[in-house]
Amino acid sequence: MPDQFGDKTHPATPHRRQKAREEGQVAQSQDLASAIVLLGAVIGLMWLGKGLTTRMLEFFTDRLGSAPPLNQDLDGLVADSWRVFRFLGESVLPFLGLMLFVAGAAHFLQIGWILAPQRLMPDASRISPLQGAKRLFSMGNGVKLALGLAKVAVVAVVAAVSVWSRIGVLLSLSELAMRAQCATTVDFLLTTALHVAIALLILAILDYAFQRWKYEQDLKMTTQELREEYKNLQGDPQIIARRKQVQRQLAQSRLKMTVPQADVVVTNPTELAVALRYDAETMEAPVVVAKGAGVIAAQIRRLALENGIPILERKELARALYAQVEVNHPIPADQYAAVAEVLKYVYELKGRPLPKAG
């Protein structure tokens, strides 16, 4: 966003966050996913490696320890090869499945489920030599290079310390039998890899925290961006104000037509106003012809006074009718008695005979 719109000082709105997510912009660290996969691989090898190594050693010892048949035909060769591949698949696939699950979980825990097909659309800037050169020599890439060198240094130090701490074991390998040498070497390599993986995981967590902070900073909005988003979502404030003005005018026009037809206006006394009309020949029950609160209630009372409509203060009845009955709808049965009492008073006040329902 151009500088003339101001600094980004406002937190991102939910709409901006959702839009950024739909565009594939999320806070994630590739280093964290790689470190988790590496740690999972090391733990998986420490857990499954011994049994896997034993099975494979026995299998190849059996296969290679005996002389192959000299009269092997093509079908026998294919069947024999299929047994080898099946054994390798049954032995290796569980470990590969574990690695696939760990890799998926590492990414899912960071960003959850996200589908951004627009990220796959062709973008000329991605293949532009000029844009590529700018990205290559950008400040961000310089920082990434420095961090990468720092990670290499940390890994080298951790690996050196791990090796040095078990240098005695390495020096005594020549005194062991071949099988023990292999087991000790594998154990030594896995232990060193575990220490390196833990160091990388710590660095990756720090990198994820930085990526999260940078993501929040990038999502922040200027005052102008907030205004533009509000306009796009809610519409132009001037148009909204004009629309509300037109709605008020329409409401006032309806009140000028409906309130003079009412028989009585029930009030709260100043907060609410409900205008009632009853025609025994055409209506089964009194109908609410107008209602309102605040300014609308005041206008209903004013129109009632101008047209000689009686205004009665009935707080409980006004609240109930305002809350329960919509305009042009009859009153509920539980309010018949209270409304009948009001209409009876009004007809007696006007000296008119009480209408009888047909």
Image (cartoon, helix red, strand yellow):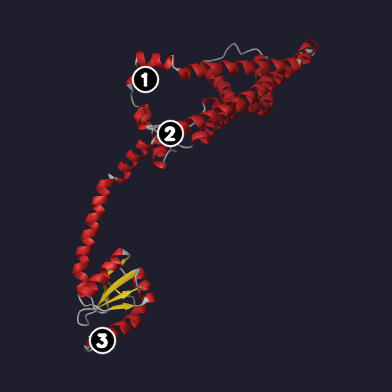
Identify the residue at horizontal 57%, vertical 28% (top origin): 99
Identify the residue at horizontal 21%, vertical 78% (top origin): 308
> Amino acid under label 2?
Leu
Q: Earlier in the sequence, mark 2 or mark 3?
A: 2
Which of the two residues, 260 or 28, is positioned nearer the viewer here? Answer: 260
Res 56 label: none
In which quadrant is the N terminus drawn? Answer: top left
Decide if residue 22 is on the left or right side of residue 260. Answer: right
Res 349 label: 3
Q: Quadrant of residue 289?
A: bottom left
Res 126 label: 1
> Amino acid under label 1?
Arg
Identify the residue at horizontal 35%, vertical 14% (top origin): 130
Label 2 sits on residue:
219
In which quadrant is the C terminus drawn? Answer: bottom left
Disc 2 versus disc 3: nearer the observer = 3
Q: Which percent across, then down, holds residue 115?
A: 41, 35
Decide if residue 231 is on the left or right side of residue 192. Answer: left
In the rendered view, tell whether residue 183 sits above or below residue 217: above
Q: Secondary structure at mark 3?
A: helix
Q: Secondary structure at mark 2?
A: helix
Disc 3 versus disc 1: nearer the observer = 3
Q: Residue furthest right?
A: 175
